[in-house]
Image (tube, helix red, strand yellow):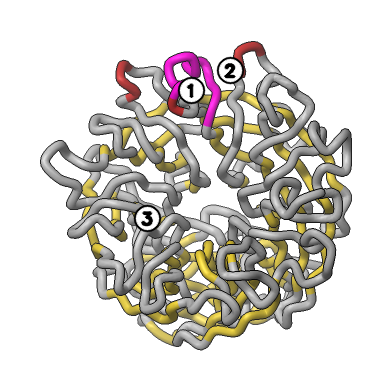
Amino acid sequence: MLYATTAIALPAQTLTTLFSFDGIDGRGPQTPLVQGTDGNFYGTTNVGGANGYGTVFKITPSGALTTLYSFAGYPADGNWPTGLVQAANGDFYGTTEYGGASCGDIGGCGTVFKITPSGTLTTLYSFCSQGGVCQDGSQPFAGLVQATNGDFYGTTGAGGANCITSVGCGTVFKITPSGRLTTLYNFCSQGSHSTCLDGFQPYTGLVQATNGDFYGTTFQGGASDVCNSGCGTVFKITPGGTLTTLYSFCSQSGCTDGGGPKAGLVQAANEDFYGTTLEGGANDDLCAPISGCGTVFKITPSGALTTLYSFCSQSGCTDGRGPQAELVEGTDGNLYGTTVSGGSHDEGTVFKITPSGTIRTLYNFCPPSACPHGENPFAGLIQGTNGDFYGTTSGGGAIGDGTVFSLSVGLGPFVKTLPHNGEVGAAITILGTDLTGTTSVSFNGTPAAFEVVSATEITTTVPAGATTGSIQVTTPGGALVSSGPFLVLP
């Protein structure tokens, strides 16, 4: 998705708890939200719901939550759902880490599913259905990405052709919108099963870069032998399945470059990638007994890595510790993220970091008396089209089952597109705020015909003569311009 803004950042920030889970409507959300074309946010809870196996929910920007689906577990539809992505057809696609038709109730396996905005769910694929020890992969810990070809790409954290048990290793896969799965790569294809020079356990999803290739991380493995099972990698993989390991963590003495990346990457407007590691960093000796401090890093598409920040650089780790979620590039050009622990009360933080590495803590979760605003944000943030950021905490809130929150930092409204690329004549949906009364839409200066569907949605097509560049929407409230380019495909 693409971003834009004309707003000015303000020095203050305000966090608002929008909803507190109570178990019946879900418990323990640990994956990021996604904003739908209707302007609402969609997400999942790992557990809870009517059957205790997790839910899919919708929540308005003001905090009205609707449970769309409660998972039933084995053998029906899986359990422990991960993140969602809204496809070009308007439906949402996601994965469950456990369950499915091929597994017992306490097994791994997992599924890929489709769910409509109204809550009708279809299981598209059940992992471990190709025989052996889950040769088609097992336990997709992360959500999917829809590529420019319309198919979805993702990872499994376990299984694969090179594994002797159903745990470890992992795969990269492609799946069509109708559910036909192709395994593109099996980890542990390089080195022995105990070393896995190409990495193993990709706990995160993929991001498709502007060059058409996919980039991701593995939690363990790699060329460095400092860690017991390797320290993790950054890799690139082509749509056809050719994988290149770009970087192995703990390549620097003392793991000052970080280790164990448990979050995916984001490609910024400068075309470099940014990410976090759960462990390692310059201050890791302070955190080793509690699984490390962690870092924020930048890596070029060719694999040159720069450590931008090492957490626990402040006494008592008041700057946060253990980031486990993807970063998001805000419309001001800065990166925003969360740490699952550390901060003033050791229950996690929200932070902002510049592309050059200057960090600022925006919020500390859980004051000493209680945790009304939540605690331990495992998931990252999403910036809504009104300019505010939205996220979840896995715990805290009214009864301790987690929350949904918004964070205002003074940024203004902008627009997103679904999809973020297309050929001339392709149907495109523009998502925004207060779009009623829009008078013009243009693709990099080329006017386009459009229809205002609602205050949050415009439908249009890529006009003849359009070139890659920003999209501008003129509304009664002013011009909204995407900060990144819409990619016009040949």
Amino acid type, label 2:
Thr
* Residue ID at (53%, 67%): 84
Q: Name the element at disc 2.
A: loop
Amino acid type, label 3:
Gly
Q: Residue furthest left?
A: 369
User: Quadrant of the rendered structure where residue 230 is?
Assistant: top right
> Which of the two discs, 3 and 2, labels the residue nearer the N terminus?
2
Whether residue 265 sits left or right of residue 246 in the image: it is left
Residue 375 screen position, x and y as percent: 29, 46
**In the rendered image, which residue does mark 2 sit on?**
256
Residue 391: assigned label: 3
* Residue ID at (68%, 79%): 124
Residue 373 screen position, x and y as percent: 22, 51
**In the rendered image, which residue does mark 1 sit on?**
310
Q: Is 357 above or below relative to 339? A: above
Cβ–Cβ below 8 Å for labels 1 and 2? Answer: yes
Q: What is the distance, in whole Å, between disc 3 and disc 1 at their CAs?
A: 23 Å
Residue 486 screen position, x and y as percent: 63, 62
Q: What stretch is highlighted in magenta?
A: 279-289
Whether residue 150 is visible to the viewer of this picture, yes or no, is: yes
> Which of the two discs, 1 and 2, labels the residue nearer the N terminus?
2
Residue 41 screen position, x and y as percent: 40, 69
* Residue ID at (46%, 85%): 119
Instruction: Decide which of 127, 199 is in the foreground and name it.
Output: 127
Q: Is 346 above or below relative to 209? A: above
Quarter of the N terminus within the rendering: bottom right
